[in-house]
Amino acid sequence: MSFTFNELRNSCKDNWHAYLQHDFVRRLGDGTLAPEAFRHYLKQDYLFLIQFGRAFALAAYKSPTLADLRHAKAGLDAIIDLELGLHIDYCTRWNISEQELNELPEARATLAYTRYVLDTGNRGDLLDLHVALAPCLVGYAELARWLTEQPGTVRGESNPYEAWIAMYESAEFQAAAQAEITWLNERLADVPPSRFKQLCRIFDDATRLEIDFWDMGLEQRM
């Protein structure tokens, strides 16, 4: 039996929808999210991305082939050279300096998800690590597409979060997410049902932790 990423995603359909269509995401789309909530999220997302950079560095270490190593390097480059740079510039527009970002403590939700990913990668193999990472990389690309399809989403200068939506719907980010899906599909095709069940649990856990991260932003929790 051959498995795919779609089956992995469908194994936790309810949580996946709760993650993609969270109130935080909806309010980003219609422009009604409280600015204080967004600033809190931006700060924690900076810390989140640094830990995900470490996770892709771990993926490089765990890579058994040159192709896997190149894929891990591409993921690391996407975070360190693309997303983090854009994030720092974007934070500046919201009057958050890079120095302030570097002095922040991590919220509990930030700690929970990022350390779960790193722990999963350390205990398991490369596929375990990528499955734990997938809700972030693939999920953000999917929710950006979902937002563009919603009639209530406000685009342009009238939405203060337009640049955030545009970043994740960009061709570069969408291509990175698709490359991750392709990589996962190639590996999932060879796993037996018992192994796929384990991976579904990892994916569901990571998705639930992503929901908690939205909750943290919306409620401005530490």
Image (cartoon, rainbow, N blue to C red):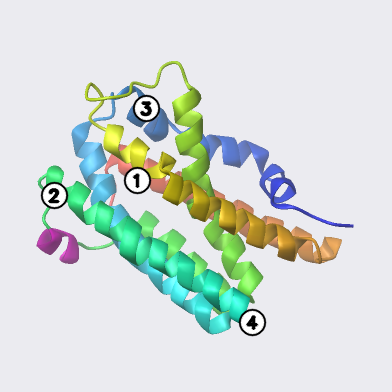
Residue 212 placement, left or right of 27 = right
Report, in whole angstroms, how far the alpha carbon at label 1 lies from the one at label 3: 18 Å
**Left/right of residue 48 with respect to residue 36 in the rendered view:** right
Mark 3 touching mark 2, by CB under 8 A? no
Identity, as a three-letter code, of the amino acid under mark 3? Gly
Sooner in the amino-acid sequence: mark 1 or mark 2 = 2
The disc at residue 92 is 2
Q: CA distance from mark 1 to mark 2?
A: 21 Å
Q: Secondary structure at mark 4?
A: loop
Residue 29 is labelled as 3
Q: Comparing marks 1 and 3, which lies closer to the viewer?
A: 3
**Amino acid type for the residue under numbered disc 4:** Thr
Of the image marks 1 and 3, the number of the one nearer the N terminus = 3
Looking at the rendering, the stretch of residues picked out in magenta corresponds to: 98-103
For the residue labelled by badge 1, is the local secondary structure a helix, a strand or a loop?
A: helix
Number of the front mark, 4 or 1: 4
Lower sequence index among marks 3 and 2: 3
Residue shown at 39%/41% (left/top)?
A: 215
Nearest-to-viewer mark from 4 and 2: 4
Label 3: few (<14), some (14–19) or many (≥20) C-alpha neighbours in 10 Å:
many
Residue found 41% across the figure and 43% down from its top? 170
Q: CA distance from mark 3 to mark 4?
A: 40 Å
The prevailing secondary structure element of the residues shown in magenta is helix
Q: Three-letter amino acid code at disc 2?
A: Thr
Judged from the image, the secondary structure of the residue bearing numbered disc 3 is: helix
CB of mark 4 within 8 Å of CB of mark 1? no
Q: Are marks 1 and 2 in contact (CB under 8 Å)?
A: no
Tell me how far mark 4 sits from mark 2, CA to CA.
39 Å
Q: Write down the residue under mark 1.
A: 216
Q: Can you say which quadrant of the picture contains the N terminus?
A: bottom right
Residue carrying label 4: 65
